[in-house]
Image (tube, grey):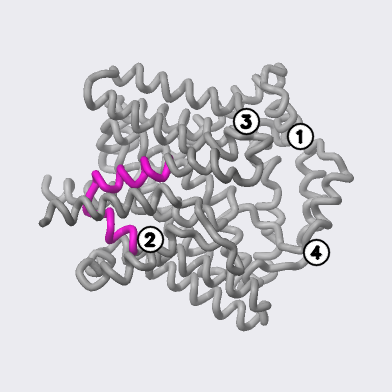
Amino acid sequence: MRIAKLNFLDTLAFSIAILWFVNVRVVGNLYTSELLLFVVFVAMFKRHGHLLFEPLPKRILLFGLLWLFSQIVTDLIRLTEFTSLAKGWASIVFFLVGFAALYMLVSDNSRRLKLFIIAFALGGLLRCLIDPGYGFEEEPWKFGFGLPVMLLTIFVVVWGIEKKILIPFLGEVILLMMGGLSIYLNGRSLGGTIILAVLLFRFSKVRLFQQLFLVRSNLVKKIGLFLVATGTVFLILVSYQWVGDSQMLPENAQYKYERNKSSSLGALGLILGGRNEVLASIPAVIDSPIIGHGSWAEDPKYREYLYEINAIFGVDVDEDMLKRFIESKDSIPAHSHLMQSWVWAGLLGAIFWIVVLKIIADSAMASMRFPRAWSVLILFVSIKAVWDLLFSPFSSEMRLLWDWELILLLTVLTKTRKKGQSA
C-alpha cells in the first residue's frame, strides 16, 4: 500500500513538472501545473501541512505573505486598474501556493525532488518542440534548449561520477565545455553560471580554501568568499570580452556583444550594459520607497532615464531603436525580481527577495562546506537564482522554476543543519 502511494506521488510530481509550459490565457498566463499544485495543496495540507511550519519554509511563506499584503495595500492606495491588480495579486498567490504544495510533495523525498527537476528539464525540451516562446526563433539556445540541456547534463555527469563511470575531473571538464558552448551560442549568463559553479566546486575541495573561507565561517570569511567569487566572475567577463573584441563569436552573439559593451565600464559593462532597466527603476524606488507604485506600474517619466543611463555607460545603441523601445509602453522599467517587487509592492516586496538571497547564500556555502558530486547542481542553481533575482523580471514562467529551486536549496540547508547537530 505504501509503495503504491509513493508511486502515485512520483507520477504526480513528474506530470506536474513536465507539463509546466502548458498554459491558457486568463487575464494573465494560467499554467496547468499551477492548477494541479492548487489541488495538491488542498489534498495534502491536512496530513502534511505541518511541514510548512518548519523554520525555513515558514520563513519563505511568512515574508511572501507580507509581500502579498504590501502589494494589496499598494494597489488599493494607488487605485490600480482591475486587470493589472488581478495579475499582480494572482502572480504572488500562485507562487506561494505552488511553493507550499510542492514542498509538501517532494521536500522529504530527495529521489522525488530529483525526478521533478529532470521532468522539468524534459518539459523545457518539449516546449521547444511544441510551443517555443519569445526569442526562440532567433536564439534557440538562450530562449529554449539552454537551461534544460544544462540541467540534464549536470544530472548525467553527477550520475556518471557516482556510478564511477566518470572520474570527477573529466565530469568537471565536460561541464566547463558546456559553459563555453553556451557562451558561444549567446547564452552568456547560463554559460558563466555553470563555469563559476564548477570553479567554486573545485575550490571547495581544496583544504586551504576550506580553512580560509568555510570552516568556522564568520563575517570576515564570508566577505573573503564573496570577493573570491566576484574575482572569478570578473575573470570570466574579461575572457569573454577578449573573445568578443577578437571577433571570434558567431554573428548573432557578436552583434549582441557589440550592442551591449560599454566604453566607460569595461568588463563590468557587459553585465549592466544590457540591463540598464534595473538602474532606471532606482528613481521610482527613491520616489516611493515604502509604498510601491502598484502592480504592472506605469509612468513614462521613468523610462526617460534610459537615455541618460545609456549615455553614461557609453553603450552603442541605435538612437531610433532606443526611442522606439522607450515609447512602446509606459511601464516602469524593472528588469529584476528585487527591483520589480520594490517598484510594484514597496519595501516589503524587496525584503522578501533579500530574505531569499540570504537563503541562497547560506545554501551555497553549505554545499561548499561539505562538497559532494551534487554540490555542482546546488552551486549552479544558487548562482543562477542570484542572477535571476538581480537581473531578470519575475515573469509567470519563473514561478514554478523558483518553487523547485527554493525547495532544493532549503533541503540542502535542512540536511546540513541536521548533520551539524548530530556531529
Q: Position of residue 170 (x, y in %)?
A: 35, 17
- Residue under the point 65% across and 25% down: 241
Categorize mark 3 by other alpha carbons within 10 Å: few (<14), some (14-19), many (20+).
Answer: many
- Residue under the point 49% across and 35% down: 193
Q: Can residue 26 be seen in the rendering of this structure?
A: yes
Rounded to the nearest whole Å, what is the CA distance between mark 4 and mark 2? Answer: 36 Å
In this view, the mark in front (3 or 1)? 3
Q: Which amino acid, by three-letter code, is at mark 2?
A: Phe
Categorize mark 2 by other alpha carbons within 10 Å: few (<14), some (14-19), many (20+).
Answer: many
Magenta range is: 101-121
Q: Earlier in the sequence, mark 4 or mark 3?
A: 3
In this view, the mark in front (2 or 1)? 2
What residue is pinned by disc 3?
A: 186
- Residue under the point 28% across and 58% down: 105
Residues marked 3 and 1 touching at CB (< 8 Å): no
Residues marked 4 and 1 touching at CB (< 8 Å): no
Q: Earlier in the sequence, mark 2 or mark 3?
A: 2
Above/below status of 419 relative to 180: below
Q: Position of residue 373 (x, y in %)?
A: 28, 31
Q: Is residue 345 left or right of residue 178?
A: right
Check disc 2 and report its element: helix, strand or loop: helix
